[in-house]
Image (cartoon, helix red, strand yellow):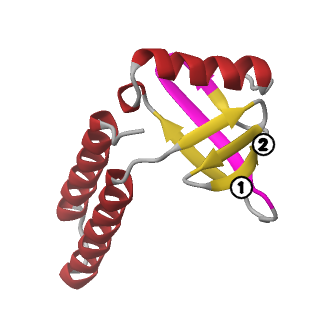
Amino acid sequence: MRASRIARALIVASAAATLAMLSLIPGSLAVRAAAMAWSLTVACHALARHRRGHSVRIQGRSIIIDGVPGEVVDGSFVAPWLTIVHWRPLGARFRRTLLVLPDMLDPGAFRRLRVILRWEGKIRA
C-alpha cells in the first residue's frame, strides 16, 4: 500500500486548524507556545508514520501486516470510502489499527480487501 494523499491533507489541515485555534485563545503566551510546539511535533510524527507504505496479506481472519502475523479482531469497519482494520499480532496483548483509504490501493485491490474483510472475516459494515 502506498501513502494516501487524502490522509496527508487531513493531517496537515488538522494541524493548521489546531495551530490557528491555539493562536486565538486567551492565555499565557508560554503555555500557548508549548502547546503549539507539541502540536507540530505530533503532526510531524503522524506525517512521518504515514509516509511509509504497508504490506498487507489477508485470508479470512488471519492477517500479516509488514511481516507481522496476527488476526483480525472485532471492531473493524468496511465502507466504500474507508476501511478500518483492527488486528492483534500473535502473542500481543493489545490490538492495532490500520486505516485504508481508497487512494492507497488500486480500485480492484481495495475492493478485494473490503470483500475479504466483510464476507470472510464477518466484519460489520
Q: If you read the primary sequence from the N terminus, does the residue marked by circle 2 or circle 1 appear first?
A: 2
Q: Amino acid at mark 1?
A: Arg
Determine if residue 125 is in view.
Answer: no
Residue at 30% from the left image edge and 56% from the top image edge: 47
Across and down, in percent, residue 118 comes to 71, 20
Reading the image, the residue beneath label 1 is 95
Q: Which span of residues is magenta-colored?
A: 78-90
Answer whether residue 89 is visible to the viewer in this image.
Answer: yes
> Which residue: 27% across, 54% down?
15
Which corner quadrant holds the C terminus?
top right
- Secondary structure beneath dot 2 equals loop
Helix, strand or loop status at disc 1: loop
Residue under pointer 2: 73
Is 75 displayed left or right of 105 in the figure? Answer: right
Question: Amino acid type of disc 2?
Answer: Val
Left or right of 91? Residue 100 is: left
Closest to the observer: 118 or 41?
Answer: 118
Task: Tally the marks.
Answer: 2
User: Residue 21 magenta-drawn?
Assistant: no
22 or 13, which is in the foreground? Answer: 13
Find residue 63 and report its image quarter: top right
Q: Position of residue 50 (x, y in %)?
A: 36, 52
Distance, label 2 to label 1, CA atoms, is 8 Å
Counting from the top left corner in percent of width and height, residue 76 is at 68, 35
